[in-house]
Image (cartoon, helix red, strand yellow):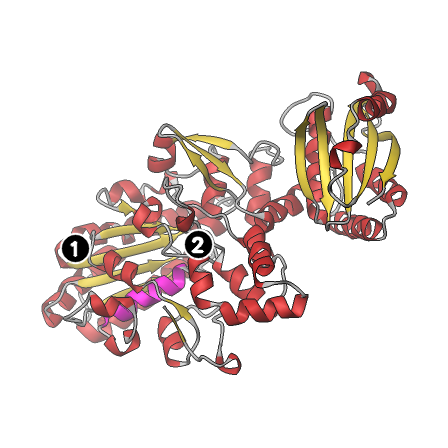
Amino acid sequence: MLTGGTAMATRKLPIGIQGFEMIRREGYLYVDKTDMVWEIANGRTYNFLSRPRRFGKSLLTSTLKCYFEGKKGLFEGLKIMELEKEWPKRQVFSFDFSGKETAEVLDDYIAGKLKDYEEIYGKSNFTDINTRLVALMMKAHEKTGHQVAVLVDEYDAPLQHTLFKEDEHEKVVEIYRSFFPALKTAGDHLKCLFLTGITKFTQLSLFSTLNTISIIGTWEKYATVCGITQQEILDNFQPELEAMGKKNGWTTDETIAKLKDMYDGYRFSEDDDPEKMVYNPYSLICALDARKISNYWAASGGSFLLMKMLQATKNDGQDLDGSIVKATTFEEADVSLSNLPLFLYQLGYLTIENYNGRVYKLGFPNTEVRDALYEVVLPNIIDKSESTVESAIESLYVDLDEDNIDEMMKDLKQLFAETQYSQNSNEYLTEERYRFIMRQTFSLVGCKIEEEKQISTGRIDMVAKFRNKIILVFELKMDVNGGVEEAKKQIVENNYLSAFSNEKMRVYGIAVSFSSKKRGIENYEILGPTEK
């Protein structure tokens, strides 16, 4: 159920609104997840939910807070009303660690929060975080007659901020080792601990300290607790879908297809039911509000940590799509830089693609995420500045839009000049590595990419489709493997262009030769186009 105004003029989309009470009181639209809120609140005592940034963790935490505080009026008309009959008012000890970038700031924040709660329940004689929190939980339980709830939102934010600052990171860890054990010590006074974050950290040992904590982020019943499903879009956002389609000249079905390609595809459990897949809620709502497809999630930040991780692990992104992670590692291990795919899964750059009972296969969930990763990786892999790459991508887009394929290849040749060797080995550049770079480049331009496309007469290296106007059929060769002549021969003899005769688009064959010595495009030849 979606609540809020019904007329288009009064439908307010909650972009960046993280407070449940504000959403309900001020009439913002709300996709009803309160049945799962009730399940979390009344299920296991210790709970940890990991989701990528901008996925609604803070809103979920705020909703739990309002529920535990017994604010029944905020929930009228929602699913939880069929589940909760008593509405007890509990003390909620609420902590938000986002934005706490140093140990000193974190320590001061926790001390300040404890002082605020001590003004309600009385100051103890203790001075350390651990015993002060235990005392507060005990006193609150005794005074209210109800066990307390402890909510810690974005617990790992200080750890991420200090991840590459060893001394500062250890100081943060020491604070955590004082704070979190209190939640186990005072377990008799605790109704629910709800902890959110993006990652688990091996060096923290938090999850061994709270050895009964439930890692609910991969539980099937909570797969859609953050994010928005296809059905929820259809049920709740019809006016916005229609308005977006009208502005862009799309049917409603076309609008949904474009939104799906760009923002859908997240899977957070082993269940492969399409109904359990979710859209990135931030990007989806931004797109519906602006009535425009764009990379909203990437633009909202987060690329710094990604780049630092790729550099630290000497990974250029080439082998991330299709990563394989053992089930035991995926479900039980803390995340560290030694397992980059698992780290990127929790950051939101990869998602579950397949599970066979033994291993998880991870892949890019959608176009927005793939492009977000490539925008970080491409400047690094070809040794160019971000501004140079961004300018080149825009030039390539204009070239394709104007059907100027010769100019496109000149711009591409310039972009690829002096491409650096792989960080993963000392080997010379190979055809596979160049194909990987080509895929990144044309994906950022906005093309739909197929690699090693099998047709009746052979296997095409790469096909790039641009806006239902142009198809580029690439055959790629290193200079030592026959170069441009051999690539051209393969296109012609195998009739690659004729394989697309039914597409009603202009089709170009492009034979490309790469130089291992000069590190770039040595030569190219354009074949075609075939007419529409």
Q: Report the front residue among 504 and 428.
A: 504
Q: CA gap, disc 2 to disc 1?
A: 25 Å
- Report the residue at 62% width, 27% height from top: 424
Q: Residue 288's x, y, as percent?
A: 56, 66
- Residue at mark 1: 186
Quick check: 85 above or below 101? below
Q: Is residue 291 visible?
A: no
Q: Rate crowding at label 1 as few (under 14), some (14 to 19) or many (20 or more) other CA atoms within 10 Å.
A: some
Q: Residue 55's x, y, as percent?
A: 45, 57
- Residue at mark 2: 157
**Figure quadrant of residue 191:** bottom left
Left or right? Give the position of 306 relative to 105: right
Q: Range of the magenta residues?
A: 57-69
The kind of residue on which mark 1 rests is: Ala
The kind of residue on which mark 2 rests is: Ala
Question: In the rendered picture of this protein, how many numbered marks are placed on residues?
Answer: 2
Q: Is residue 259 visible?
A: yes
Residue 32: say if magenta: no
Residue 62: say if magenta: yes
Quick check: 266 above or below 325? below
Q: Residue 344's x, y, as percent?
A: 50, 42
